[in-house]
Every structure is written in C-alpha cells, then in structure tokens.
Image: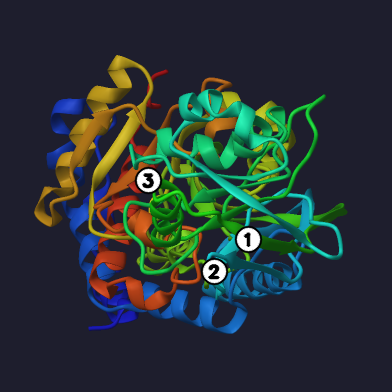
Amino acid sequence: MSITRIGYSLLIGMTLMMPPAQVTAQDIQTTYREAADRLIDAALSDSSAYHRLSALVDQFGPRFSGSSNLEDAIDWILEAMRLDGLENVRGEPVMVPRWVRGHESLELTRPRARTLPMLGLGGSIGTPPQGITAQVLVVRDWADLAQKADLARGRIVVYNPPWEGYGNTVAYRRDGAVEAAKVGAVASLIASVTPYSMQTPHTGNSAYAEGVPRIPHAAMTREDVQMLERMQHRGERIEVRLYMEAQQMPDVESRNIVGEIVGREFPEEVVVLGGHIDSWDVGQGAMDDGGGSVAAWEAVRLMHALGMRPRRTVRVVLWTNEENGLRGGTAYRDQHADELSNHILAMESDAGVFKPSGFGFTGSDAAFGIVREVGSLLDRIEAGTVTRGGGGADIGPIMQRGVPGMGLQVDGTRYFWYHHTDADTIDKLDPEEVARCVATMAVMAYVIADMPERLPR
C-alpha cells in the first residue's frame, strides 16, 4: 500500500490519537503507540527513502564544499521539499572553505616501479610542479617517529599505526604533517584510517600548526604501507615520487537546507533533526552523509504525508560543510542564537544508514528517562535502545549552548570500510535498513515534538 493511501485511510482517526493534557514518562508508550506504529508502518511500506537517495547521489555524485555538485544538489532538494509540501523551505547562506584537489599521483620508484593508489588529505598544500621525489621512512606511531627523528630529515615520513578505532587512529591524519615537519620531513603519508582495505585510500581533513612548515600530506592504502614497512625491515632503500596540485581557494557561499512542519500549539518551540549534505570529493557520499540527510528529510515528509502535525515545530536541517570546516553547524548556531532556548531537542544521523539500534543521548537525567521511554516505541524494529552520551558534529555547536542532543546509532561494522573513499556508493546500503532509520528518527522526533510538556533540560 502506498504512503498516500495509508495517510488517507488513517487520517480519519487522527482525533482519536490526541494525547491527554499531561503525559508522563510512564504513559508515553500507551499514549503514542498508535502514532509510532503509523510512522513505522509507513516508513517500511516501500523504499522511497532509498530511491530518493539513489536519485540524489546518481545525479549529483560527490558534493564537496565549494563545488557546483553541492550547490546543484541543494537546489534540487529545496525544490523537492517544496513539492513534498514542507513549510518554510529555505536555504540559509553559509560561507564555506574551498579546497581543490587537482591532479595527484604517487609512484614507487625504488626498489621497483609501481603506481600507488593515494588521495590527498583535505587542506593539504600541493607539491612543487615537479613533485617531490625522496626516500621513505616508515614509522609506527608518534613514539617511533621521535626515536627515528634523526633519520626523517629530507625524507617522506609514512605512518603505519595500528587500527585502534577511528577516534584514536585519525590523529595521524589530522596531525601527521605537523609532526613530520617538526623533524624535517619534506612530505608525509598515512595508512588510510580504516580497519579494512581493498586498495582503497581514504581521504579526510588534516591540519597545520602556526610556526611549523607546511608539507604535503596524503593517504595511501593500508596494503601498500605494509609493503613499504616490509621493504624497510629488509633494509631496502625505498623512494617515491609524490605529485599534488592541491590548493586552498577563497571562501564561497553555500547554504544550509531547512524545511519544517510548523507546530500546531507551540510553533516557536523546535525539534531539529538532520544530517550533512556535503561530502568529500570522492565516491557518491551515499553513506556519509547523503543517507543520514535523506533519512531525516523522509522522516519529516512522512509526518506531513500522514497529516501528523505535532504540537511543536519539527525542522529538518541538512547542514553544509561538515567535512572540512563545520561552517554549517556553526552558522546555524549563530543564525538561530535567539531561538536556542526554545530548541527542545537536536538529532543527527551521521554514522551511515545501516541497521539502527537506537540513539545516544546527551541531556538531563529527567530528559534521559523520557527519551528512553519514547525509545521503547521502537522495540518492534529493534531500534529502541537509548544510551547515555551522543550527538553529532553539526549539532555540537548548539548542544554547547544547552540544547539536548542525540545521535542515531546503527550497526557500524562496515562504516569505516567505505568512509571517505571512492567506495562510498549507494550499493553499500540496504533499502530496508534505510527505511528503519527513517522510522526510528520519525518516531523519536514526532513524540518529543508532540508531548504536552517540554523535554526538561
């Protein structure tokens, strides 16, 4: 049955769904069971979210900040939101950085010739026009680099740290160029930040430090870095030629995408949910974070299609420039600074749209008890677990101003296999899992927006 037919057949009974004047944590499940089931049934009735995501990523591809791909995708989404019937649809302007990759290559020249897959890291400078040809020094970690500091001058440092989870291993991507430059390296390379590789280099943002020379910084595949380490252990001389045209251009204008269902009783109070619409300049950005953006959008579209207008405003925001600047999240905070006291909850999906398990939540103990009870409405699709601690990069700036936040939690087994690579394409996602993510976000957002009392801070 189509969503439209579901909405038509069930809209008649809307008045029977109205909750009583007071709703406590203990009776949320009873009061909102029917509404939750309607949203879940509608989300799982077809693969509309997956098909919409497919159309987005196939038509526009990767959506890097400063690119025409991103701005054309934003125009397309704004028009589609209006056709969906969402209210107050708009693009809120944001100035974003523009880093241009250009042509790049990495070649092993000694002890044998081989072209090595690589991706320059965001924010990196380029090489001289002739490239950089130098001997390689492979190190395992910061301590190993310090021990071999005397050998690093004039070489290209290659980091091969063990995978210890993204939060730990990403430090070599972020700070690798700085630490290598401090000991005199002419460039730095990292084993891609991933637990699993099939000759797929992973890009991502990096940083420089004031007072430290800036050197080119790029990612290799884990397989090739391990090969270089084996060569070094055998005492072989290793040389590579690195070529990068990367450059930082002046900032350009982009937009945060906003659409709403205006609340029927407390329109000034807002539950916001979303993902980031930008992606890196490789692959399709289907998993990171086209899927999260479309899931949040679809959650709000379903409420509208089913005629479910909650007491408070539900606002979907697709933030721009999360990947290499977080300008969208900070701009939203600044542009809505006077409204943040009336932001009831912020929700983000930026971990892939694989099978959802629930949410991680950051807020008061009283609020945590309520969102856990709301989570129980999702037990039928095994997505009802709410744990302490959660949020997201884009909602981080408003969470710092006191807005309770939550992040959608999903099966992360394969997320970092494809993260920031050419392999982040739509085929890695399952239509039913995407639909479950839609249902999970829709139920949580609707119930929190419709309760008679505000979620306590």
Circle 1: is it few (<14), some (14-19), or many (20+) Cα within 10 Å? many
Residue 225 seen by the camera: yes
Nearer to us of marks 1 and 2 is: 1
Q: Which x, y percent locates residue 22? A: 27, 27
The earlier-in-sequence mark between 2 and 3 is 2
Query: Which residue: 62% across, 47% down?
Result: 205
Earlier residue among tags 1 and 3:
1
Q: Amino acid at mark 1?
A: Val
Tell me whether circle 1 and circle 3 mark residues in contact (CB < 8 Å): no
Query: Where, by quadrant of the figure, is residue 126 drawn?
Result: bottom right
Q: Does 240 sit above or below residue 61?
A: above
Above or below — where is 383 with respect to 364?
A: below
From the viewer's side, name the closer residue of 351 and 356. Answer: 351
User: Please, what secondary structure does the residue beneath circle 1 have?
Assistant: strand
* Farthest residue, direction front: 235
Distance of label 1 from label 2 (alpha carbons): 9 Å
- Nearer the observer, 181 or 453: 181
- x and y percent of residue 90 in the render? 70, 59
The colour scheme used here is rainbow
> Sequence order check: which comes first, mark 1 or mark 2?
2
**Mark pair 1, 3: CA separation:** 52 Å
Residue at 52% x, 58% y is 220
Q: Which residue carries the number 3 mark?
A: 445
Q: Are marks 1 and 2 in contact (CB under 8 Å)?
A: yes
Per the rendering, the mark at residue 240 is 1
Q: Can the viewer see residue 278?
A: no
Disc 2 versus disc 3: nearer the observer? 2
Residue 158, disc:
none
